[in-house]
Structures are given as C-alpha cells and as structure tokens.
Amino acid sequence: MADDTPQVTPEGASRCSGSLWCGAATILVLATVLAFTTNSLRPSHSIHLGRDYFNENPAVETDNGSESEVSGNGTEPDSGDPPMVEPDDGIQRLSFEEARDNFYSGEDEFEATGESIYLFVDARERDLYEERHIPGAVWLYHYESEQLIDDLRPELEMAFFVIVYCNGGDCEDSLHLAADLSSLYGIPTENIYVFEGGLNEWVDNEMPVVSGSERR
Amino acid sequence: MELVRKLDATGVPLLLARIIVGFTFLYYGAEKIGDPIPFLKSLKGYDVLPLHPSWVINSLAVVLPWVEVMCAAALLSGIQLRSAALLTTVMLAVFTPLILNLGLSLVGTEVAFESLCDVVADCGCGSGKVRICPKLASNCGLLALSLWALLSRATRFRGGLGG
C-alpha cells in the first residue's frame, strides 16, 4: 500500500497518476466540477443547493408580527367549515370525504360564477399531472415551485381553500409544498390544506379525473 | 487460492467485472443525472443524512450520480481502473446496508409487505420501485465484482477494453 500514498512533491506528481488514492481524488474532483456545472446550466430538473425541499413546518405571523410555527389544532378558516384531521405539525389535513365535499362545492361555484374559492393544487411531476388529475387542479410541482409560483400566485391568494395533494400513500410532496406555500410564498397558513389520501384515494373512490395539460 | 490466482491471471474475471460494473453504474448514473429529484427524495428516505443545512443532501444528490458515471467511464476505459473500483466498492458497501435497512423499515407497513422479500420500494438506484431482495442480491454481486477489479493482479484486460 506504500505505493498508493499520495505524493505532493513535483517529483511525486507524475507518480500520482498511478496512485490509488490520487486517482480516486481526481475522479471525485472531476465529478464534482461536472456535477455543479451541469446543475447550474440545465434549464429544468436542477436542484437549488440552498433550498430546503423537505420543509415541514409552515410559519405564520403572530400577533406581535414575529414568525412562529403553527402548533396545536391549527386555525379555523374564515369561510366555510372544512373539518380538520388532528394536525400535529401545523399542516391541516383533509379526509377524502372532506376533499370530495369541497370539490363539489367548488365545481358548483365555478359553474355558477366562473370562479371558485376552492383551489386544488397538484404537487406531482408534469407527466403524472397530464396523465390524470382532479378536475380544476392547477399544476405546481413541488421541486420546481420557484419557477411556477408567479403564474399561480393570484389564484392562490384568492382562494380560501388551497387543497394540496400528491399521489397519497408514502408521498410527502404535498406536505412539503403546503409548508412552502406558507413559509416561502406567503399564502395564509389557515387557507392551506393537505389531502393526504391523494390521487390514489380519489381514484379508488371513483371520483372524476381529467387528462392532459388543461385543468378541466 | 491457487485456482483463484490462476483464474485471475487470465484477466477474464477482471474484464467481466469492468464491463458489468461499468455499464451498471453508467446506466444508473445517467438515469439519476437525467432527473436528480427522485434520487434526492430517496436520499431523504434513507433517513441517515441531516436535512439541515439543506445544501449537504442537495449537493450529494447532484454529485453522486456524476461520481457513478465517472467511475463507469474509468472502469470501461481502463484509466484509473483501480481508483474507480475503490470508489464503486465504497459506494456499494455504503448503499447496500442502507437498502437493507430501508427494506426492513417497510416490512409490515402495508398488507402486501409481510416479509423483506415482499417489499417493493424506490431505493434511489435509478430504476424506480424495485423488489428489495433481488436488488440486495444484485448489489452484493456488484460489490464482489468491484472488489475483484480493485484487488486483481491480472495484467491482461487492464487497459482499454480491447487490450
């Protein structure tokens, strides 16, 4: 193994090319340079190194203006009364029945007025959204939300019930997006809900879905 | 041991190790580079890396796939062959127990997951959701081949694949 010891002298520099450890270090350095360069240049699917993608705690303004995490049973919304399912991390959950009732209320309102205070938000990848999504749902992929949020912000701010979902099961993207909507994008925490059963539970209950990039 | 030495001296096991490990790492590395987000989620799913500061896990998700591809290129070209074998051995030695741990943690979480070999999960290997048992077996095979490439004293098939 003595031959594998990295040499730092000019004489040893040429020997580094045959060294086990120098070779490994060279591969790691090259890979790192290539990785960060391509990550910074690619137009999509890039990872923002400083962003917390797994944010779980929404922040709200307290009475004295400072930010704090929501705790306890959350906050009752101003309009309507969608029941909440024992949130313990400050994120309000909706059961399937509650999501279904909100969906029908939203559809009725949309048919009558062309607008709705209920907004379903699909946190999944684009191809999954286009494969099938809840009618009326907007696409806001959690991992590219920084690029997508500006176009959707007016609707998100108008809605009283922003209902975020992903596939359900072990999918956590809806929870992370809900936390980001509150803490990063300033959507009022009390208006944000997560439908944890997600699209799988929605489909299992034979609820309507639509395909393609159009919302309805 | 003599038989192993003679077998090694033919260079054929080294060549096979380079081809199998090289193309496997090339394929899985390229898949992850194409879309690093599922790999980032899998890294989080292993529950061993700190989520804060976030640049640690984010950087690993960006860099590790490129390490895989660079190792694959080195194994297939013969340039820095042993160094690449060292890195693939380390990666497999780290990730295989993590996959086992992930599989064990999922046993009983769903009706279908009665035992380890029933568990289907995304291990972040670049192949989506897979059965954990075959994945562990394949990783152990790759680990053995990587070790062979690292420790082999064969002089044949050490350079470019044609030589």
Image (cartoon, rainbow, N blue to C red):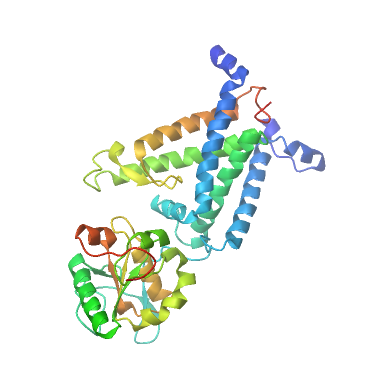
Q: Residue farthest to the bottom? A: A64
Return the x and y of residue A93 as percentages of the image width and height.
25, 68
Confirm whether residue B107 shows in the render. Answer: yes
Which residue is situated farthest in the right direction here?
A11
Q: Image point 33% across, 77% down: which residue?
A: A189
Viewer-side residue, A177 vs B51: A177
Q: Does residue A22 sit above or below B37 in this rendering? A: above
Which of the 4 image quarters holds residue B22?
top right
User: Does B116 appear above or below A140?
Assistant: above
Say whether residue A55 is left or right of residue A19: left
Report the number of discs: 0
Instruction: Please provide percent x and percent y for residue A20.
Output: 66, 36
Looking at the picture, tell me which residue is in the foreground, B63 or B33: B33
Q: In the rendered image, which quarter contains the C terminus of chain B?
A: top right
Q: Which residue is drawn at 61% across and 37% down?
A: B84
Position above or below: A5 against B10: below
Task: Say whether residue B90 is visible.
Answer: no
- Can you give x and y, in whole percent of width and height, for residue A67 in the image? 39, 79
| Residue drawn at x 28%, y 39% as measured from the top left | B118
For the N terminus of chain B, the quadrant is top right
Q: In this view, does B155 lie to the left or right of B29?
A: right
Where residue A72 sits, quadrant-wise, is bottom left
Q: Position of residue B86 (x, y in %)?
A: 58, 36
The vertical placement of A126 against B127, above or below, is below
Q: Which residue is drawn at 21% across and 74% down?
A: A104
